[in-house]
Amino acid sequence: MTNPDKLPLPEVTPYTGTYADNVARIALDVGEGLLTNGADVHRVEIAIEKICRTYGAAHIDVFTIHSLILAAVYMPDGTHSTQSRRIFETSNNLTRLELYNALSRKLCEEKPSIDHADEEIQAIKKEGSYPFFLTLIAYVISAGSFAIFFGGTLRDGISAGLIGIITALLDRIRIDQINKMVKTMLISFVSGALSCLSVHIGIGQNLDMIIIGTIMLLIPGLSLGNAMRDLLSGDTLTGTLKSVQAIIIAVMMVLGYALALLIAGGGLK
Amino acid sequence: MKDIVVRLITAMLGTVGFAMLFRVSRKRLPWAALGGLLTWAVYELFTHLFGDPLISAFASSLFMTLYSEALARVLRAPAIIFLFPCAIPIVPGSGLYYTVYNLIFYNENAFFANAKTTLSIVLGMAVGMSVASIVVGALLHAVRTLKNIKS
């Protein structure tokens, strides 16, 4: 269901359409930005509703789940607009989230013109990217420290860190036709096999600990926690969908690692 | 004791690593690191006192949400920036993995043990975060009411 090549909205200025259309579009842009960068659905709905109210809407209906935003905006003069956004991929880019959050607050407080808001949104899209070597370092630090965290030795940490580099490189490859679940399985298989290899050639000592370190990079533990919070705060649909998604990703990872253990590690434990 | 120190340090480093994966801006990284360290310290403390993952997860999530909300007010940033990295050491990544692993390969006892721990931690985290945000909401409401009375 993922579509990494989702085309961005065309950058035509000025957009045609009524005032209601434009208000809904701006609000959805901000909402989409918040949702794709890690905000919870409740917050997205509140932000969209507030922005529309600031720009004079008389009535708003917003419905958000983790993969879709629907918003209907009704103006006092009778014009109205209903628009939707399909969300394919969510990443936790917290710098961008911070910027979208600030923009949403600014829209509600200062009420800048639609064109100005457009410019700000385009500016945010260019922000918040790290150079690739920092991402690599992040993978190494996370995998290495969690291998030691769960009881591994320093050598386990080093081998988990090295495998983290491979994981980062594999994660960066974008194969158009491959589905996200299969990709997760492939990455798990490769890092599982490399963990076995590192023990074989003597860099690592405890296979379990190296594997745990590399697992932490892929496992959707945080999204399971967030899903449970969604469930508790009443967003039953999003909570359920996210939990199921997290469990399926975990299943794919287990299959990948198990295959690697079968082939390279001399059997399952 | 040595184990605890090692875990504290690696929890902090892991938090920094994940904060970088979450693209937290560089000036906020030290705060995220401190948060990860303190959150794990709270977790260790409650594990030492009660030995129950549910209570430890609840207490540490309560702490990290309050920490993030307080920092958010001081540094004028959304709380989530500090909350996500801080949550990483408590998040039951290995638990989820082992649960599914034992489910697929029919190790009933290990499956139930891991599922119980994982669910306890996830539930404890969710309740802790929810309770903390209710507390923060109440505090903000109180502050606002006080300001209105004064003016």
Image (cartoon, coloured by chain):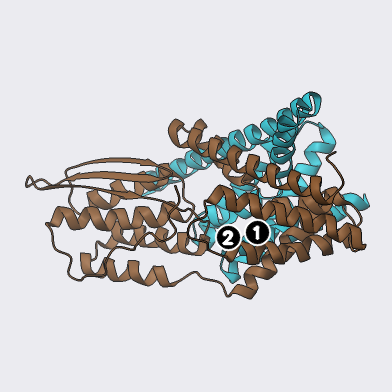
Chain colours: A brown, B cyan
Contact flag, marks 2 and 1 (Cβ < 8 Å)? yes
Chain ID of residue with mark 2: B
Badge 1, how many Cα within 10 Å: few under 14, some, many 20+? Answer: many
Labelled disc at residue A176: none
Q: Nearer the viewer, residue B84 or A158?
A: A158
Marker count (numbered): 2
Reading the image, the residue beneath label 1 is B18
Q: Are marks 2 and 1 on the same chain?
A: yes
Reading the image, the residue beneath label 2 is B22
The residue that appears at 36% across and 45% down in the rendered structure is: A68
The residue that appears at 69% across and 42% down in the rendered structure is: A255
Left or right of B34 in this view: A12: left
Q: Nearer the viewer, residue B126 or B73?
A: B126
> Looking at the picture, how far across and down is residue B77, in whole percent?
49, 60
C-alpha span from label 2 to label 1: 6 Å
The picture quadrant where one finds residue A187 is: bottom right
At numbered mark 2, what does the secondary structure look like: helix, strand or loop? Answer: loop
Q: Is residue B54 visible?
A: no
Residue farthest toward the left in the current orientation of the protein: A77
Q: Nearer the viewer, residue B109 or A142?
A: B109
> Looking at the picture, how far across and down is residue A262, in whole percent?
80, 45
Left or right of B117 in this view: A154: right
Q: Is residue A122 above or below residue A199?
A: below
Q: Is residue B65 above or below residue A145?
A: above
The residue that appears at 69% across and 57% down in the rendered structure is: B15
Q: Is residue B93 visible?
A: yes
Q: Is residue A103 above or below residue A185?
A: below
Disc 2 marks a residue whose amino acid type is Phe
Disc 1 marks a residue whose amino acid type is Phe
> Looking at the picture, how far across and down is residue A190, in whole percent?
72, 57
Chain ID of residue with mark 1: B
